[in-house]
Image: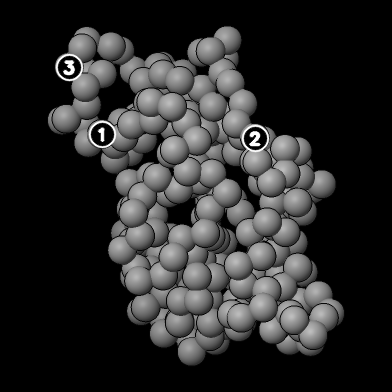
Amino acid sequence: MENKAFTVSLTKNPLITMKVIPGHFTTSHFHISHYLDVSDLKTNALIAKDVARELAMPYLASILVDTIVCMEGMEVIGAYMAEELLQEGISVINSGSEIHVVTPMSNVNGNLIFQSNIQELILNRNIILLVASISSGRTISSALECLSYYGGELAGISALFNAYPDKSGKEIYSMFTNEDIPGYQIFSPGECSMCKEGRKLDAIITSEGYTEI
């Protein structure tokens, strides 16, 4: 599969790139035509800092932020994003404030929860929800339900990649979209055109990466 990979670069900052592998992939909920490798964006400190700077821009001047909730291993970017939002400057609305970076956990039923010592950082706080990839919308729906339960106020949603129309009432700020990937498609398993063509699955995708079948 790797020999079919290609790279997508961010127009505003060509140093920020995402490796894309075409194929027939499955997650726990859907089938998808491309695997998006964003691991370097999340774990390479120098690149993550540039990514955080791009993702922070829509919030700098006009949106108050108290807490950044990180999903799918976005904690490094979340920390750098908080640093960007707290920089000194008369046009930086969060300058001189405090921003906490937290991650929910899953309970035995698979529901997202916040531990007791973290809940006060969510209740009545302005929250940025930070995720790696938005495709089916399940991660976003689960996270928004969790924030609502604990009384958080959604200030915005940011993602490395987004292929899902926003239904939260808040714009999704993303660096890459499905329009950057020719032929990108997502299917429910029963409606997958690749399955109907008899194409075997190449790999299983999780938030940590992929495993070839």
Residue at image coords 22%, 36%: 188
Give the residue pinned by disc 1: 187
**Element carrying mark 1:** strand
Q: CA distance from mark 3 to mark 1?
A: 12 Å
Residue at image coords 49%, 64%: 157
Q: Is residue 86 left or right of residue 100?
A: right
The crowding category of the residue bearing disc 2, from other C-alpha atoms within 10 Å (few below 14, some 14 to 19, many at least 20), is some
Q: Residue furthest front?
A: 11
Q: Which mark is residue 196?
A: 3
Q: Residue furthest bottom?
A: 124
Nearer the viewer's eye, disc 2 or disc 3? 2
Q: Is residue 184 left or right of residue 83?
A: left
In the rendered image, residue 72, in percent from the top left (x then y), is placed at 53, 51
Q: CA distance from mark 1 to mark 2?
A: 25 Å
In the rendered image, residue 12, in percent from the top left (x then y), is placed at 69, 46
Point out the image quarter for the C terminus: top left
Give the residue pinned by disc 2: 9
The crowding category of the residue bearing disc 3, from other C-alpha atoms within 10 Å (few below 14, some 14 to 19, many at least 20), is few
Residue 111, visible in the rendered structure: no
Whichever of labels 1 and 2 marks the residue nearer the N terminus, that label is 2
